[in-house]
Amino acid sequence: MTTIERLSETELFENIFKPENRSDPYPFYRQLRRQPVSRIEDGRWVITRHRDIAQLLRDPRVGVSKPDPSDPRRQTIRKPDGSPFEGPFLNQDPPGHDELRAVVTDEFIPRVMTIRGHLEELVSAHLAPFVTGQAGELDVVNDLAYPLPVTVICELLGVPREDEAIFGDFARRLTRGLDPAETQTDEDLRELAIARGEMTAYCAGLFDFRRENPDDGLLCALMNRLDLFDLHATVQLLLIAGHETTVNLITNGTLTLMRNPSAMARLREDPDLAIPLVEEVLRYEPPVQMTTRRALADIDLGGVTITQGSRMFLMLAAGNRDETVFADPDRFVPDRESNPHLAYGGGVHYCVGATLARAEAQIALTALARRMRAPALVADPPPYRENAILRGPEHLPVAFERMSA
């Protein structure tokens, strides 16, 4: 039997994507950090040390990782003027990225800053069915972590309430496309194309509806400032980036609290603990495990040269447990004082929705800690979702003796 210490860097990397390792990929990250800048067999680079990842996230010589132009499965979409459509701003480098991001930031951030009180109302509404005075069980994913962020993003966009379930279904199906193409089958790619087509068709109808029924929501604001291609891409990005990552943050946070009952007890008594506690969840169990980049020039790093054009995997989850940065990195410390985690990236691509995601998680985790009496995990580890990059449980059933109002 091969031990993890004898695995090559390529084998360690491949193991992170295997479903049987989804519940605990951290031993593989730890082993990869022993060779923090490594080149795997297909020529890609895997970066696992905190300082190297932080540097590359902010380095102007590093760009987003675009699809391989030689891949026959890649389709080039062109705008009416003949220029190639580059996709959402998350997949673009400056200056195109900066122009689109500025529009989204202008319209998104002011709306988010006024929403905290409403988030508390939404969390209470989602937990209300369990306030029966009797013992019960909830699936944190289906009953709170999924519906909360989809309700929030739909309300921000101005999506009709009855269509929230449609948006949630799109998010589930589209996230598979975030894993590396090498891990996806032709059937995965066909399903992804179908989901994208259905989402585009739905959004086209939604845009028509809002043109005839304008409101002061985010969608109408974006419609006034973006062309149709960028509008479609931005709405789909906000759905996935603003929804799927928050689902994992809330679910991973709940699972971590269940495994650390003293931390849950402290949060129950001190709601202010939610602020550093959520930051520690982001470090300890980040909802986004890794991100991809490409070298726009030769880059010297860790004693090697990453040549121009090379693709890189920046392993955020590995950097978040770097023992040279975090004391006792494999232990959950809810009030950790120095916590420069990498969960939201860095540089020009720092997550535009970080403020909203933090608020949703702080309120949701505090409510669960305060309201549930004698909670217990039904299964540990729980079943995990297929996606390795957006890592989180598929379901998280929790039994409790009583749910208070």
Image: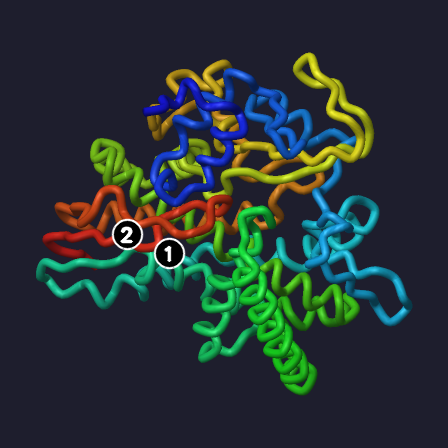
Q: At x 87% / y 71%, what residue is drawn?
A: 80
SS at badge 1: helix
Residue annotated with mark 2: 396
**Location of residue 307 in the rendering, given as x and y in whole percent from the top left corner:** 78, 27
Residue 273 against residue 385 in the figure, above or below: above
245 vs 11, nearest the viewer: 11
Crowding at label 1, few (<14), some or many (≥20) Cα neighbours within 10 Å?
many
Of the image marks 2 and 1, the number of the one nearer the N terminus = 1
Q: CA distance from mark 2 to mark 1?
A: 10 Å
User: What residue is drawn where x is 57% and y is 50%?
Assistant: 353
Q: How many marks?
A: 2
The residue to which callout 1 is attached is: 145
Mark 2 residue type:
Leu
Q: Quadrant of residue 298?
A: top right
- Residue 323 in percent (x, y) is at 46, 16
Residue 138 in percent (x, y) is at 23, 59
- Identify which residue, 285 or 363, lies in the foreground: 285
